[in-house]
Image (spheres, grey):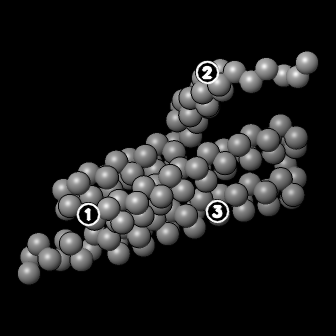
Amino acid sequence: MGLRHDTARSFKYAFSGIKTAYKNEPNLRIHTFFAIFAISLGAALGVSIIEWLLLTFTIFYVITLELLNTVLEAMVNMVSPEISPYARIAKDVSAACVLLAAFMSVIVGFVIFLPKIISLFY
């Protein structure tokens, strides 16, 4: 007899993980603030379906990488509580992934929003 898969319990654990991450990770709260800002701006400026898809993908990409960064940091801290050059590399490179995704999201925001904002004035 194998392990029983309980979908409801899986969702409970997933939402618990999101709650824990928001409680403990200030960068996740910052990303969420900018996501809400981008969604609000998109609604105000009337972005297209394709632009909504791009915005949504970008937002979830950044937040997912932030969550993965949190996982990696916790695992590194658990496995290597002492300061180790390898642990530092893992943490720094994981943080760099989030940073690159955040930079990409800024570029996507400029590409989508800047022409619409400029057209309001011309």
Is residue 20 visible in this depiction of the protein? Answer: no
Disc 2 marks which residue? 8
Q: Residue furthest bottom?
A: 122
Residue identified by numbered label 3: 97
Q: Nearer the viewer, residue 71 or 10?
A: 10
**Where residue 100 sits in the image (x, y, percent)?**
57, 67
Which quadrant holds the N terminus? Answer: top right
Q: Residue at x 72, y 62 (%)?
A: 93
Q: Residue furthest right?
A: 1
| Amino acid, disc 1 | Val
- Disc sitting over residue 57 in the figure: none
Q: Helix, strand or loop at disc 1?
A: loop
Give the residue displayed 74% in from the left and 47% down from the top.
72
> Which label's residue is closer to the chain start, 1 or 2?
2
Q: What amino acid is at disc 2?
A: Ala
First in sequence: mark 3 vs mark 2: 2
- Residue found 67% across the figure and 50% down from its top: 69
| Disc 2: CA contacts within 10 A as few (<14), some (14-19) or many (>=20) | few
**For residue 18, above or below residue 67:** above
Q: Please, is residue 51 above or below residue 31 in the view?
A: below
Residue on which disc 1 sits? 47
- Left or right: residue 76 versus residue 49 is right
Q: Is residue 5 left or right of residue 81?
A: left
* CA separation in Å, label 3 and label 2: 31 Å
The span from disc 3 to disc 1 (Cα, nearest Å) is 27 Å
Other residues around mark 3 within 10 Å, as few (<14) / some (14–19) / many (≥20): some
Quadrant position of the C terminus in the picture = bottom left
